[in-house]
Amino acid sequence: MNYISVAVDGPAGAGKSSVSKTVAKDLGYTYIDTGAMYRCVALFAIENGIDIKNDVPTLIAGLDGIKIDMRNTGDGQRVYLNGLDVSERIREEDVSVGASDVAVIPEVRVKLVDMQREMAKSANVIMDGRDICSHVLPDAQVKIFLTASIEARAKRRYDELCRKGIECDFEKIKSDIAYRDKNDSEREVSPLKKAEDAVLLDTTELCFDEVVEKIKELIINVV
Ligand code: DC
């Protein structure tokens, strides 16, 4: 059986995961959040006192000890690191910045990309990340590059944290996003870049439902 793969790339805070999750639910696809996998590696480093930037060999030596499980629930996905549910912890700011730092390490990418390709072999998937269209699933039937201005992305993240009652600072969120944009797009291995054959969707002026509908249309056109 041939499965459908939908690849969604874009910078931090563009809304990739919330939009992809909704589209996956509506169409009965499996949602795969590859950023969560890089976040798990970062959390593993933080919990084991490994200095991500200055002690890469220790992190690489520890990679075989990292077991990541993504379990789909009715309305999304729970993420387990070595058997523990870390779904909320991996969203915290120290892990966000750490994830961008571990993502420049080629050995980390090879391990996670292998896992991601395996996952796409046995189901219709919507996979989001930074290198999905260009590298992980170059044969995906639908490819989308989702972006928005940095102001809009920082504002969405700020509003999301405020809604959850988490104290935060808008300028700090914006500068963290700018740091990750730079890191993700300037790294040597699989930098964040729109694939030539990906459809560009700028969501700065679009509401959530409009983005979901546009992506569903693109999928429905190919199936
Ligand atoms: O999508 P996210 O913000 O949860 O991703 C966290 C970090 O992981 C991000 O800064 C870049 C990295 N990442 C990556 O390099 N490649 C992917 N396919 C997914 C995420």
Image (cartoon, grey):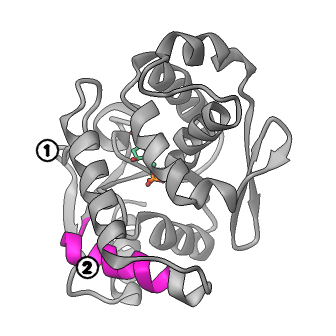
Which sits in the foreground, 35 or 218?
35
Which sits in the foreground, 212 or 69?
69
Q: Report the residue marked by disc 1.
A: 196
Tell me the amino acid under the disc marked 2: Ala
Nearer-N-terminus badge (2/1): 2
At x 35% / y 37%, what residue is drawn? 139
How far apart are the alpha carbons under marks 2 and 1?
25 Å
The magenta segment: 147-160
Quadrant of the snapshot with the N terminus: top right
The vertical placement of 44 against 29, above or below, is: above
Residue 148 in magenta stretch: yes
* Cβ–Cβ under 8 Å for marks 2 and 1: no
**Other residues around mark 2 within 10 Å, as few (<14) / some (14–19) / many (≥20):** some
SS under mark 1? loop
Q: Where's residue 108, x and y in %? A: 50, 23
Q: Quadrant location of residue 50?
A: top right
Q: Where's residue 59, x and y in %? A: 57, 19
Q: Where's residue 172, x and y in %? A: 34, 67
At x 61% / y 86%, what residue is drawn? 165
Quadrant of the snapshot with the C terminus: bottom left
Q: Quadrant location of residue 103?
A: top left
Residue 4 in magenta stretch: no
Tell me the amino acid under the disc marked 1: Glu
Q: Where's residue 126, x and y in %? A: 50, 55
Residue 64 in sight: yes
Which sits in the foreground, 38 or 50?
50
Q: Report the residue marked by disc 2.
A: 152
SS under mark 2? helix
The vertical placement of 110 against 146, above or below, is: above
